[in-house]
Image (spheres, helix red, strand yellow):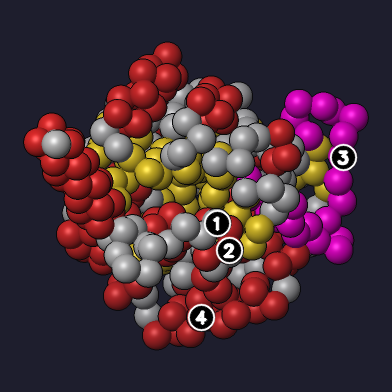
Amino acid sequence: MKRTYITTFLTCIAVLCLFFGISRTRNISGAMSEITVGFIYESDESAPYSYNFSRAAVLLKEELRDSVNIETRSNVPDDAIEDTLQELSLKGCSIIFTNCHSENISTLAAEYPGIQICQISDMVVPPTEYPDNYHTFNSEIYQARYVSGIAAGLKLQELIDQGVITKEEAVVGYVGAYPASSVISGYTAFLVGVRSIVPEAVMKVSYTHTWSSYMKEKSCAQELIEDGCVVLSHHSDTIGVAVACEEAAAERPVIFIGCNKSYQDIAPTATLLSIRTNWVPYMIDAVTAVMNHQTIESRVKAKVHGKNDMSAGFAENALDILDLNRAADKMLRVIDDSIKNLLDHPEIAYQGPYTGMNPEEPSDWITLEKGYIENLDSSAPSFHYVLEDVIQIVRK
């Protein structure tokens, strides 16, 4: 009889422990009261791309406070993805966000069905092939590229009106990592924005063939400036272009449009403004969805493409334009009006008397009289045509 009492007592203790263990992660309504969130960065937080992603992690913690525990892994190469996912799973992560470009993540997600894995989309992919717990997301960054191009065009027009440059000298430079659709889509929208103000503007593009090389990015920017470019922007991941513009701005007019962070501290003379994706709304809603046992796509305010793929733009607060305090009142009004017009007519970011060729398939051409709607079927940018006559690839 005594042994029975002891067994019953121990069973009660076990049940109570289990109850209180569950209570730590769920409130009375069944929602989790505490969650561990993993972040995997392809670089470290000193690189603008991962810095902007890590900023969202900080703001997520500030918003949800003690209910969120953050686990971060930086500088994760492709061959370390599998070990990193396993490590974060052992840390108890319920959701993982990553900005890595690895294609392995979508396959490995099936091995962790209890973890929601969210990856920035990098390419056009069939969304129905992936596990239910794998999600892709991205901003409609072309919107910010287009609007920042309009701002650059206004500054170019100002230089023309002042007699500093002629219309024929309205040359735009762009440093891109690779001739991928994500890069081509961005610089095309940027140039169309510039040309909506200065129709004579043309663009020169230089590729580095790496996402992160300070020396290559700076060198490409210097060459573009020496080749007559007055405006420079970039889709690359160091401060190299900004530094090159600031150094040149001491002797000639050079306008810099940055991405992923403010460059006021690096290029205070050259920087007009910068753009970035605001990852915070997606992350907060995705984490809240998991805590409440909801699907991420049912909670996040964004466009859903196929299975578990989402994109968002200005309308969903997924894009920021930084350093607008430097802009004149006229420019601020034009930017505001341009955003409203773009949201009503998304095709205008790729509309005009243009013909474009797919650099990967020379027989593939497109005409843009009626425009092109980006992110219509996927969160990954899909426009991949180089515009004839107005865009020159100077370093392939």
The residue pinned by badge 3 equals: 365
Task: Tell me if residue 364 is in the magenta stretch.
Answer: yes
Residue 142 - label: none
Looking at the rendered image, the quarter that the N terminus falls into is: top left
The image shows residue 234 at horizontal and vertical percentages of 46, 44
Residue carrying label 4: 336
Q: Nearer the viewer, mark 1 or mark 3?
A: 1
Q: Amino acid at mark 2?
A: Ser
Q: Position of residue 323 (x, y in %)?
A: 31, 67
Residue at the location (75% across, 65% down)? 347
Q: Main secondary structure of the magenta part?
A: loop
Q: Quadrant of residue 242?
A: top left
Mark 2 and mark 1: span between their CA atoms?
5 Å
Residue under label 1: 295
Dot 4 falls on a residue whose secondary structure is helix
Does the magenta segment cover residue 221?
no
Choose the circle earlier in sequence order: 4 or 1. Answer: 1
Amino acid identity at mark 3: Trp
C-alpha gap between disc 3 and disc 4:
33 Å
In the displayed structure, would residue 27 be above or below residue 101? below
Labels 1 and 3: the sequence-earlier one: 1
Question: Which amino acid lies under the numbered mark 4 shown in the image of this protein?
Answer: Asp
Residue ID at (63%, 45%) = 380
- Element on which disc 3 rests: strand
> Which label was assigned to residue 298?
2
Proximity of marks 2 and 1: CB atoms separated by less than 8 Å: yes
Residue 188 can be seen in this image: no
- The span from disc 4 to disc 2 (Cα, nearest Å) is 30 Å
The earlier-in-sequence mark between 2 and 3 is 2
Magenta range is 358-380
Horizontally, residue 139 falls left or right of residue 370, namely left
